[in-house]
């Protein structure tokens, strides 16, 4: 399992997440995006419909009728209704069971002390469990640079 930490320093989650989801769909990956609460899930759901005029990200929320069929599923819970192999945890969402995933991505706002502390805690915990981790940080152009 690959565990990646994405440190946002130049953009917000709603700006950085869609291109990564687009790459995931291009690779035929099924994805779960876990948020901190239902309000944030609803916001991201609406945002993904309109984030770019020439793009379509097939997605839905955990509460939708056909949630299990969605290539990208947005949830505030810990489940995996759509059988995803990739899980994004945003805004400090607390991970549940991470087994069964090929890739886990923690995205956190570098300007939010609570999210920074949470990410550091997750890094320390997962590293202590023997997982292989990578750390990516945005440069001034908003591009990802591998730092560790």
Image: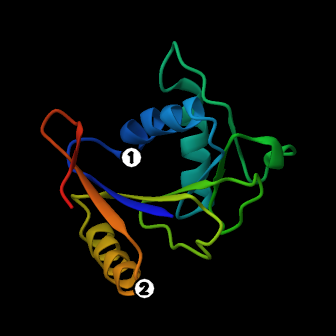
What kind of element bears circle 1? helix
Residue occupying the far right of the picture = 65
117 above or below 23? below
**In front here: 81 or 23?**
23
19 above or below 123? above
Which x, y percent locates residue 34? 57, 59
Q: Which residue is mark 1?
A: 13
Quadrant position of residue 35: bottom right
Which x, y percent locates residue 78? 65, 69
109 above or below 140? below
Q: Where the C terminus falls, by quadrant? A: bottom left
Which residue shows up at 43% across the image and 33% down it?
19
Which x, y percent locates residue 25? 59, 34
Q: How many marks?
A: 2
Which residue shows up at 39% across the image and 46% down it?
13
What kind of element bears circle 2? loop
**In front here: 23 or 7?**
23
Which x, y percent locates residue 3? 43, 63
Q: Which mark is residue 106?
A: none
Ranked by sequence position, the earlier of labels 2 and 1 is 1
Q: Which residue is mark 2?
A: 129
């Amino acid at each position: 399992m690959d565990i990646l930490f994405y440190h946002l320093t130049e953009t917000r989650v709603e700006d950085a997440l869609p291109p990564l989801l687009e790459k995931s769909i291009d690779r035929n990956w099924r994805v779960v995006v876990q948020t901190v609460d239902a309000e944030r899930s609803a916001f991201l759901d609406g945002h993904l419909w309109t984030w770019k005029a020439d793009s379509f990200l097939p997605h839905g929320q955990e509460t939708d009728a056909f949630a299990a069929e969605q290539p990208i599923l947005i949830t505030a819970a810990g489940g995996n209704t759509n059988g995803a192999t990739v899980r994004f945890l945003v805004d400090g969402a607390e991970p549940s069971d991470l087994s069964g995933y090929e890739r886990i991505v923690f995205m956190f706002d570098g300007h939010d002390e609570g999210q920074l502390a949470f990410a550091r805690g997750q890094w320390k915990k997962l590293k202590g469990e023997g997982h292989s981790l990578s750390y990516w940080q945005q440069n001034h152009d908003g591009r990802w640079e591998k730092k560790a």
